[in-house]
Image (cartoon, coloured by chain):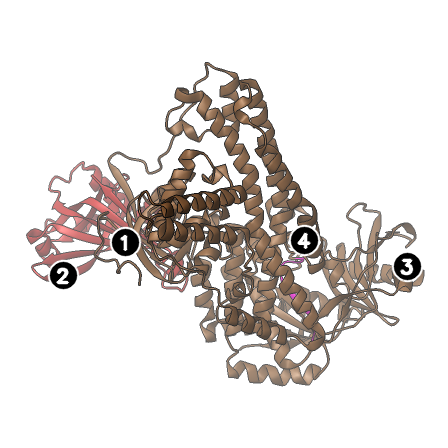
Chain colours: A red, B brown
C-alpha cells in the first residue's frame, strides 16, 4: 500500500483527533470528532461556541491537528501511523446541503443533534501541510498549494 | 497459573497450546507403546513469561517492524534475524525462572547428553510443516548449556527462514509461540526417516537411512540409502544406494561429519530384519495418528527409537521458488568448500579470460550489423554469468553468514556484527585498487602539482605520473565505472585524484591487534578437539568475504564490456537519442541499430495523485550500518559520470554501492544506500573507513535530490533531509 493509500485509510478510519489551538502564548489541545475530504484538503469538526478552543480559533486561525492509530501496545512504536495536519480554520455558516456537512454527518451520525444546536459551530481546516510519521522515525511531508 | 515444564506423561491433546504439535505427537507415540526417548517440555507459558519479564517482547517488535516487510530484501531478513538472535542470547533468564529450570532439568538429565528441539505452536500440523525451519541442537550436555540452547531455539522462531515461511503462509508473528523439547540424546548407529506413504507412489512407503545420526540426512548434507516398500506386505520393491556414503556422528559436544570405515562405507546401513522393524514402526505410527506420517527413527544397538513424527503435508506452500532458493543458501561447510574450489579454480579464471577476450575486440571497426550481433553476444554472456553469480557466488557468500551465526553463538558479543572485523582481508581487489588510487593522488598533489612550472622536475614527475596511471588503468580498467584510458576519462580521473589528494582522506580502520585478539577468543571458545574446525570455518569465511567483493569486480568487468558496446552504439546513434534516452539497454540498442528509422520511447514517473501536491521526505528510516553523524550535500550516484562529478565532503546517495565504485568512499562524508543489509559492500566499506552509513532506505535515490543538505545519523539509521538546501541549522557541524 503506498503512502497516499495509508494516509487516506488513517484519516477515514479514525474518528477522533487532537486539535491544537493557541491564544497569545498559551497553547491548548482538545479532542475533537473530525471528518476529512477525499482529497485531504479539508478537515471538518464541530465545537460549542463557548469553548476555549473556539475562542482561541477566533483570535488565531492557525491550528494543528494530530491524528493517529495507536493502540497502546508495544507494536505501536513501529506499526502506528501519526499525522500532524497544519492549516487555518474557518467557520462554515451555511451548513445546509454542504458536502462537508454530509461527510461529517455520515461519519458521526450520533452527533446530529449536537451539530444542530445553535450554540455549536461547524469548522473547517483548510489543510496546508501534512506531516506523516511512520515506523517510529520515518517522516514524510505533504504540502498542498 | 504458569506451567513452565511438562513431563511426557503430563502431555496430551489438551496441552497442545502449551507444548506444540511435536511434543503432543511424541506423547501419543509413547502411550502407544512405541519407544520414545525420555523428555521434558518447556512450555509456551515459559516462553511468554521470559519475553514479558525481561521486556524482550517489546525490543523484538521494535526491531521486527523497523521496516515494512515488502521493502525488505532477503539479506535484510537475515540481518534482522541475527539481531533478534543476539537479543535472546544477551537476555539472561530471570533468577525466578532460572532456579526452577535448573532444579527440574538437573533432576531429569544430570550429565546425560540431550537434544534440544523446537516445538512451535502449529509446527508439524497437517496444514503447515515447519520442517527445517526452526532449530534443533543435538548432543547438548549440562543444564547451563541446555538453557543456552533453549534460548537459541526460542530465537529460531525469528530465523530468516521462519520469518519468510510465516509471511508466505499468513501466520501472525505476534501470535507465534515456541515450546522447547529437551529429550535424552540417543547416539544411534543407524538412523533415518520413513514416509508411511511414498511421495512418489501411494502403494509404497519409503525408507531413507544413513550410518550414524540422521541430522546429515534431514539437513540434506548426507545422501541416504533408499528403499521403496510395499505398504501392504512390507516387500522391498526397489533399493537405491547413494553415490557415496557419509556420516554424521556425535562429538564431545554437538555433532560433526565423520569419515566412515571402508567396511561401513561399502555396506547399506540396514539389514532386511531392520527394514521390517521400521516398516512395522511406520504402520503403527500411521494407525495411531490416522494419517500418513513422516517419522524420524534411530537404531541404538538393536533398539529402534522413534524420534519424532509429523503428518505428510502437501507441497503447496513450498512452491515459491525464491524462498526455495533462499533456503538453499543454508550450505554446509563441506558444500561451501566444494563451491570454493569451483569458484577459485574454474569460474573466476574463466570470467577473466572472457573479459580479456572481449576487451581485445576493436568495436569501432565493426559494421552496424556486426555491432548489433556483438551487443547481443555480450548481453547473453553477461546474462549467463549473472545466472552463475546467483547460482554459485551468492550461495558461497553464505560462508560469511555461517561464520557469523557460529561466532555469535560461541562468543556472544555485544555487537552482532563484531565477526566482520575478523574477515577483512588485505588482498581484496577493491582495496588494492583504492590503495593504488591513493598512491596516485598523493603523488599527483605532492610531486606533479608542486614542481616548478616548466622545470625538469615537472617533466619527470609528469612522466612518472603517466606511467603510474597507465599501470593502474591496465589493472583496473572498467568502462562501466568510467575507469578507461580515453583522454576524457584521464582528465576526469585526474580531477578526482586532485580532490583525493587535497583532502586528508581516511585510512581503513583495520586494527590488526584487535583482529588477532578476536580470532584467539573465537578459537578458544571451542573445545580443543574442535579448534581445527573453528580455524577451517574462519578460513572459509575469509575467502567467502573476499570473493563476495572480488566476484563483483570480475562480473563488473564483463558488464563493463557490455557497457563499452552500448557506449559505442550510443555514439553511432548520436542525435537520435535525447538525454533521457541515453539509459537505453542492449535490447533497445540492437533494435535501433537494425532499424535506422526507429525512435526510442521515454520513461514515465510519478506517484502521489492530485494537482499541486508536493511530497517531500523529512526523515527517512533505514538501518544503522556505520556509526557516526555527518551532514552535507547529497550526491546521487546513478552513472559513472555522477562519480566523476563527486566533490569531497558530499554524501553518497545511491541504489547500491558497487565494489567497482568504492574508490570515492574515502573522500565522502557519509553513505546512504537503498539496498539494505549489514554485509553489503556499502556497509562494509563505510565501516572500514569509519564513515556514517545508513542502508536500506527505500526509494533513497528518488526521494533525495542532488545537492540537498542531508544529515546522516549512522547510530539510529535516520537520514534527515533539510528544507533549506543552502544550510541546515538543525544539522550538526560537518562531522561529529
Q: In this figure, which residue is indicated by the disc labeled 2?
A: A27
Of the numbered discs 2 and 1, the one sitting upstream in the chain is 2
| Residue B630 is a magenta residue | no
Contact, mark 4 vs mark 3 (Cβ under 8 Å): no
Left or right: B29, with B353 as reference point: right
Q: In this figure, which residue is indicated by the disc labeled 4?
A: B340
Q: Residue at x 46, y 29 (%)?
A: B584
Q: Nearer the viewer, mark 3 or mark 1?
A: 3
| Residue B139 is a magenta residue | yes
Instruction: Kindly identify which chain the residue marked by label 2 belongs to.
Output: A
Q: What segment is highlighted magenta in the picture?
A: B131-140
| Quadrant including the C terminus of chain B | bottom left
Contact, mark 4 vs mark 2 (Cβ under 8 Å): no
Which mark is drawn over residue B266?
Answer: 3
Residue B85 visible to the viewer: yes
* Mark 3 vs mark 1, CA separation in Å: 73 Å
**Residue situated furthest top in the rendering:** B597
Q: In this figure, which residue is indicated by the disc labeled 1?
A: A67
Q: Position of residue B44 (x, y in %)?
A: 57, 70
Amino acid at each position: 500500500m503506498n503512502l497516499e493509500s495509508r494516509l487516506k485509510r488513517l484519516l477515514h478510519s479514525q474518528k477522533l483527533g487532537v486539535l491544537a489551538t493557541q491564544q497569545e502564548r498559551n497553547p491548548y489541545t482538545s479532542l475533537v470528532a473530525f471528518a476529512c475530504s477525499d482529497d485531504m484538503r479539508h478537515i471538518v469538526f464541530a465545537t460549542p461556541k463557548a469553548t476555549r478552543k473556539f475562542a482561541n480559533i477566533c483570535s488565531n486561525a492557525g491550528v494543528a491537528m494530530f491524528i493517529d492509530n495507536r493502540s497502546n501496545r508495544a507494536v505501536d512504536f513501529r506499526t502506528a501511523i501519526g499525522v500532524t495536519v497544519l492549516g487555518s480554520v474557518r467557520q462554515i455558516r451555511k451548513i445546509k446541503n454542504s458536502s462537508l456537512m454530509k461527510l461529517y454527518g455520515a461519519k458521526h451520525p450520533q452527533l446530529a443533534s449536537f451539530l444542530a444546536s445553535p450554540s455549536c459551530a461547524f469548522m473547517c481546516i483548510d489543510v496546508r501541510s501534512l506531516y506523516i510519521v511512520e515506523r517510529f522515525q520515518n517522516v514524510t511531508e505533504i504540502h498542498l498549494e | 497459573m504458569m506451567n513452565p515444564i511438562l513431563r511426557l506423561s503430563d502431555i496430551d491433546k489438551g496441552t497442545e497450546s502449551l507444548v506444540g504439535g511435536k511434543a503432543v505427537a511424541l506423547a501419543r507415540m509413547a502411550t502407544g507403546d512405541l519407544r520414545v526417548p525420555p523428555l521434558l517440555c518447556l512450555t509456551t507459558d515459559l516462553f511468554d513469561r521470559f519475553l514479558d519479564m525481561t521486556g524482550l517482547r517489546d525490543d523484538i517488535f521494535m526491531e521486527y517492524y523497523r521496516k515494512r516487510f515488502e521493502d525488505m530484501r532477503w539479506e535484510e531478513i537475515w540481518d534482522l534475524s541475527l539481531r533478534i538472535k543476539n537479543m535472546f542470547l544477551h537476555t539472561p533468564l530471570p533468577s525466578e525462572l532460572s532456579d526452577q529450570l535448573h532444579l527440574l532439568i538437573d533432576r531429569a538429565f544430570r550429565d546425560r547428553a540431550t537434544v534440544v528441539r523446537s516445538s512451535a505452536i502449529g509446527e508439524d500440523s497437517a496444514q503447515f510443516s515447519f520442517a527445517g525451519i526452526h532449530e534443533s541442537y543435538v548432543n547438548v550436555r549440562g543444564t547451563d548449556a541446555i538453557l543456552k540452547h533453549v534460548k537459541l531455539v526460542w530465537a529460531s522462531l525469528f530465523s530468516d527462514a521462519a520469518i519468510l515461511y510465516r509471511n508466505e503462509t499468513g501466520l501472525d508473528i505476534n501470535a507465534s509461540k515456541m515450546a522447547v523439547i529437551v529429550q535424552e540424546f540417543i547416539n544411534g548407529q543407524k538412523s533415518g526417516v520413513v514416509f508411511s506413504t511414498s511421495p512418489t507412489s501411494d502403494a509404497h512407503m519409503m525408507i531413507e537411512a544413513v550410518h550414524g545420526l540422521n541430522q546429515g540426512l534431514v539437513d540434506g548434507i548426507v545422501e541416504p540409502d533408499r528403499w521403496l516398500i510395499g505398504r501392504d506386505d512390507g516387500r522391498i520393491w526397489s533399493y537405491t544406494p547413494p553415490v557415496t556414503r557419509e556420516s554424521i556422528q556425535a562429538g564431545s559436544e554437538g555433532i560433526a561429519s565423520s569419515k566412515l570405515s571402508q567396511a561401513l562405507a561399502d555396506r547399506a546401513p540396514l539389514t532386511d530384519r531392520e527394514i521390517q522393524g521400521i516398516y512395522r514402526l511406520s504402520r503403527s505410527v500411521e494407525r495411531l495418528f490416522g494419517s500418513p506420517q513422516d517419522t524420524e527413527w534411530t537404531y541404538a544397538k538393536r533398539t529402534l527409537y522413534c524420534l519424532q513424527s509429523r503428518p505428510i503435508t502437501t507441497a503447496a506452500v513450498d512452491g515459491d521458488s525464491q524462498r526455495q532458493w533462499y533456503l538453499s543458501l543454508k550450505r554446509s561447510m563441506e558444500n561451501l568448500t566444494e563451491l570454493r574450489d569451483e569458484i577459485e579454480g574454474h569460474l573466476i579464471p574463466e570470467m577473466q579470460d572472457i573479459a580479456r577476450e572481449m576487451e581485445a575486440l576493436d568495436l569501432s571497426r565493426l559494421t552496424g550489423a556486426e555491432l548489433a550481433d556483438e551487443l547481443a553476444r555480450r548481453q547473453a554472456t553477461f546474462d549467463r554469468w549473472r545466472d552463475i553469480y546467483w547460482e554459485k557466488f551468492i550461495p558461497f557468500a553464505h560462508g560469511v553468514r555461517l561464520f557469523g551465526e557460529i561466532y555469535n553463538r560461541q562468543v556472544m558479543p555485544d555487537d552482532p556484527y563484531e565477526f566482520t572485523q575478523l574477515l577483512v582481508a588485505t588482498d581484496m581487489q577493491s582495496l588494492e585498487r583504492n590503495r593504488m588510487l591513493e598512491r596516485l593522488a598523493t603523488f599527483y598533489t605532492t610531486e606533479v602539482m608542486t614542481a616548478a612550472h616548466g622545470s625538469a622536475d615537472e617533466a619527470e614527475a609528469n612522466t612518472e605520473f603517466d606511467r603510474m596511471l597507465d599501470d593502474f588503468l591496465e589493472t583496473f580498467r572498467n568502462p562501466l565505472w568510467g575507469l578507461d584510458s580515453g583522454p576524457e576519462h584521464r582528465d576526469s580521473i585526474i580531477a578526482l585524484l586532485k580532490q583525493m589528494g587535497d583532502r586528508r582522506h581516511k585510512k581503513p580502520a583495520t586494527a590488526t591487534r584487535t583482529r588477532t585478539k578476536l580470532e584467539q577468543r573465537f578459537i578458544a571458545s571451542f573445545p580443543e578437539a574442535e579448534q581445527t574446525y573453528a580455524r577451517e570455518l574462519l578460513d572459509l569465511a575469509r575467502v567467502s568475504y573476499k570473493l563476495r567483493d572480488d566476484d563483483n569486480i570480475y562480473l563488473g568487468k564483463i558488464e563493463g564490456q557490455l557497457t563499452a558496446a552500448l557506449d559505442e552504439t550510443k555514439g553511432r546513434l548520436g542525435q537520435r537519442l535525447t538525454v533521457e534516452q541515453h539509459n537505453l539497454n542492449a535490447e533497445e540498442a540492437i533494435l535501433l541499430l537494425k532499424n535506422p528509422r526507429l525512435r526510442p520511447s521515454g520513461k514515465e514517473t510519478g506517484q502521489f495523485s492530485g494537482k499541486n501536491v508536493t511530497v517531500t521526505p523529512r526523515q527517512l528510516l533505514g538501518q544503522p550500518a556505520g556509526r557516526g553523524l555527518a551532514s552535507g550535500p547529497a550526491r546521487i550516484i546513478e552513472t559513472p559520470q555522477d562519480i566523476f562529478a563527486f566533490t569531497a565532503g558530499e554524501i553518497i546517495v545511491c541504489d547500491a554501492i558497487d565494489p567497482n565504485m568504492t574508490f570515492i568512499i574515502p573522500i565522502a562524508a557519509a553513505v546512504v544506500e537503498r539496498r539494505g543489509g549489514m554485509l553489503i559492500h556499502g556497509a562494509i566499506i563505510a565501516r572500514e573507513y569509519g564513515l556514517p552509513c545508513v542502508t536500506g532506505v527505500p526509494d533513497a535515490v528518488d526521494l533525495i535530490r542532488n545537492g540537498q543538505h542531508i544529515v546522516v545519523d549512522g547510530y539510529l539509521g535516520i537520514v534527515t533531509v533539510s528544507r533549506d538546501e543552502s544550510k541546515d541549522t538543525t544539522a550538526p557541524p560537518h562531522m561529529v
